Amino acid sequence: MRIFIDTEFSDFKNPLLISIALVADDGREFYAELPVDQSRCNSFVLDTVLPLLGQEPAARCTPEELASRMVSWLLPYENQNPTLCYDFAGDWFLFSKALSYKVPIWLTPQNIYQQIDPLACETYLQANRLPQHHALYDARANQHAFNPHYLRIDPLTYPKSR
């Protein structure tokens, strides 16, 4: 069982979690948004990420609620050898931090950056008319674009705008 994760955060220098999404192979999805301290956000996040938030009022929660909600959502996968698939190490870091570094032992992390076909990812977002930089949409796109036989050869780079 694979669970794809994506996060949005304040900036690269001192990242604070803004939103997080988990999308499982069985179709279940988890999405949450945290309160945002805009003074900690860079201009890219202020202009691109924040306008995408607030569409789902039930997604809002406190950091304490987030940990509880995520653990409850993950528990049904305990006996399925789940792999948490991320394409950026910061996603794993922010996920772990949100759980106060008490990640369930039965959850295996895996960086799948090299198995994400960027063209398939972009095509998915365009075909579904979904903007980039929304955690849930990006997690869905990564799940769609994941191919264990694909080998991406470009290095992970950080956009200058973020």
Image (cartoon, rainbow, N blue to C red):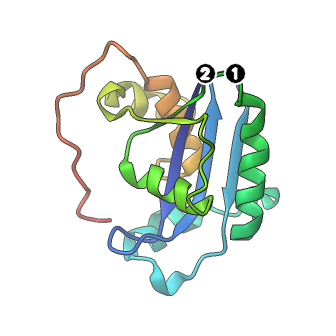
Q: For the residue marked with disc 2, what is the amino acid?
A: Met
The residue closer to the viewer here, 154 or 121, is 154
Left or right, 121 with reference to 52: left
Left or right, 58 with reference to 113: right
Q: For the residue marked with disc 1, what is the amino acid?
A: Asp
x%, y% of residue 68? 77, 57
Q: CA distance from mark 1 to mark 2?
A: 8 Å
The residue closer to the viewer here, 15 or 121, is 15
Count residues near mark 2 (Cα–Cα under 10 Å), then give few for <14, some for 14-19, many for 20+: few
Depicted 45 relative to depicted 128: above or below = below
Can you say which quadrant of the picture contains the C terminus? bottom left
Extreme-top residue of the structure: 149
Depicted 60 relative to depicted 95: above or below = below
**Quick one: label 1 or label 2, which is nearer the N terminus?**
2
Residue at image mark 1: 26
Q: Are marks 1 and 2 in contact (CB under 8 Å)?
A: yes
On residue 1, the disc is 2
Depicted 148 relative to depicted 112: above or below = above
Q: Under tag 1, what secondary structure?
A: loop
Occupied quadrant, residue 81: top right
Q: Residue at x 40, y 55 (%)?
A: 90
Occupied quadrant, residue 79: top right
x%, y% of residue 128? 57, 32
Depicted 39 relative to depicted 120: above or below = below
Count residues near mark 1 (Cα–Cα under 10 Å), then give few for <14, some for 14-19, many for 20+: few
Say if residue 51 shows up in the picture. Answer: yes
Occupied quadrant, residue 112: top left
Extreme-bottom residue of the structure: 39
